[in-house]
Image (cartoon, rainbow, N blue to C red):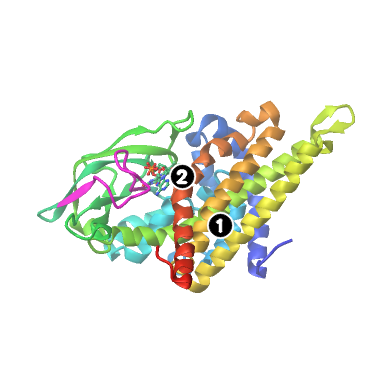
Amino acid sequence: MDFAVSDTMKHLIKQVRPFIEDELYPLEPAFLQEGFKAVETELHKKREKVKKLGLWLPQIDKEHGGLGLNVLDHALLSAELGKSPVGHYTFNCQAPDAGNMEILIKYGSPEQQETYLKPLLAGEIRSCFGMTEPDFPGSNPVWMGTTAVKDGDDYIINGRKWWTTGGDGAAFAVVMAITNPEADIHFRASQIIVPADTPGFLIEASTPFMGHRGEGWASHSEVRLENCRVPQKNLLGSEGTGFLIAQERLGPGRIHHCMRWIGICERAFDLMCRRAVQRKIAPERSLAMRQFVQGWVAESRAEIDAAKLMVLHAAWCIDRYGAKEARDQIALIKFTVANTMGRVLDRALQVYGGLGVTDYTPLALFYRTERAARIYDGADEVHKISVAKRILRQYAELLGAGE
Ligand SMILES: Cc1cc2nc3c(=O)[nH]c(=O)nc-3n(C[C@H](O)[C@H](O)[C@H](O)COP(=O)(O)OP(=O)(O)OC[C@H]3O[C@@H](n4cnc5c(N)ncnc54)[C@H](O)[C@@H]3O)c2cc1C
């Protein structure tokens, strides 16, 4: 039964669901076994179909050629797209491009929008986002080593980044660098657009990730910026606002991730149930007749539904009150859904037995790549600490107790 789904969204989902199943599922075996580049050309044909169906850029406002869905409606759609590992990519709402689009719309100068935003929205180029560094803790991103120093009309950027998702083949990177080292720690960094062909922007490796280096959009780059010179007009927003801008992309971005994970849960659940009823463990006896499996089915259904309701509520809160007011709801879903997904994937994979750990189903890919969901966009512990601190502070104030 659908919850909080408007008639417009019901219609949209009716269009998107068969598209994912009929057009994208058949591409998955090649993607899973041969990699992103094996399906890139086909995916671009599918992208043209998405454009023709009027479903392109669901998260972007109509003025910029998108569907203009609010956070709640995009969350609902994301759960459909997330069922395939290439769903979001095909609709041009994949990380990290979606976040870069959002900040270019909000903070990009007319020239930046013409040069970088327009082709990104059209799906002609890809981009990446370089904040995390190998030598500094991503969990405390205000402490970083990359610097951008003014020289004439330019910045000269030096530093190292890693986990730069989609760096391989990206046309430009949005790089976070310290521009104001004397300022308060939260106002030291800026976001600067660095075209990938700038001398000194060096992709040194794709990071091996659970046994796979990946390629193209489905990979994570290690980048060295060595006396990398870019014009100061490539600054996004004003100097020192790097973290403010980063914060803005994170609220709705976390909803997108969480609903994509709900989509992964639904796909895993569907695969698990199909296998349970079809796999015979003896003549006339299916796995579905075993109580262990029945327990996993019931627990998974309950956990997915609970997680989904939490995400939809958080999305509703963002639409109604803004991301800042909804920060507790956002933090709660980030670690709740990541862990729900881990459990559901684990059970589905177990039901598949040996087949579960092959690349003949998407379960193994989801299982190995999405373990990282508990780490990126804020590790579980960081979100738990921030929510708990706010709750306990309220109790301390209520009871007149110290910190
Ligand atoms: C698949 C993937 C994609 C990514 N994509 C991008 C990208 O496109 N661009 C980008 O800039 N970055 C990206 N990242 C980086 C990601 O944001 C960082 O990995 C994350 O912020 C954690 O930083 P870290 O790896 O340096 O871990 P650390 O900061 O070293 O933390 C290690 C662990 O310490 C624990 N911890 C940290 N702080 C606390 C605390 N206060 N209390 C208790 N425990 C704590 C947590 O368990 C954490 O997992 C990506 C990462 C992954 C895995």
Measuring from the top left, give residue 223's x and y in whole percent: 30, 38
Q: Name the residue nearer the viewer: 385 or 182.
A: 385
Residue 262 visible to an observer of this rendering: yes
Q: In which quarter of the image is residue 311?
A: bottom right
**Residue 142 is covered by the magenta coloring:** yes
Q: Report how far apart the C-alphas of labels 1 and 2 lie in the structure.
A: 37 Å
Residue type at the position of mark 2: Ile
Tell me the residue at 48%/72% (across/down): 398
Observer-nearest residue: 234 or 318? 318
Few, some or many residues within 10 Å of mark 1 (<14, 14–19, 20+): few
Answer left or right for 57 relative to 301: left
Write the residue at 60% across / 60% down: 310
Does the numbered disc 2 mark a residue whose Cβ is under 8 Å from ligand 1? yes
Query: Sequence-wise, which precedes: disc 1 or disc 2?
Result: 1
Indicate the position of residue 67 as horizontal and vertical percent values: 52, 65
Asked if the residue under mark 2 is in contact with the one under mark 1, i.e. CB atoms within 8 Å, the reply is: no
- Predominant secondary structure, magenta span: loop
Q: Name the residue under label 1.
A: 52
The secondary element bearing badge 2 is classed as: loop
The answer to whether residue 102 is visible is no
Quadrant the C terminus occupies: bottom left
User: Tag 1, which secondary structure?
Assistant: helix
Find the magenta span and give its range. Answer: 129-149
Is residue 323 found inside the magenta-colored segment of the image?
A: no
Image quarter for ligand 1: top left
- Residue to which mark 2 is pinned: 375
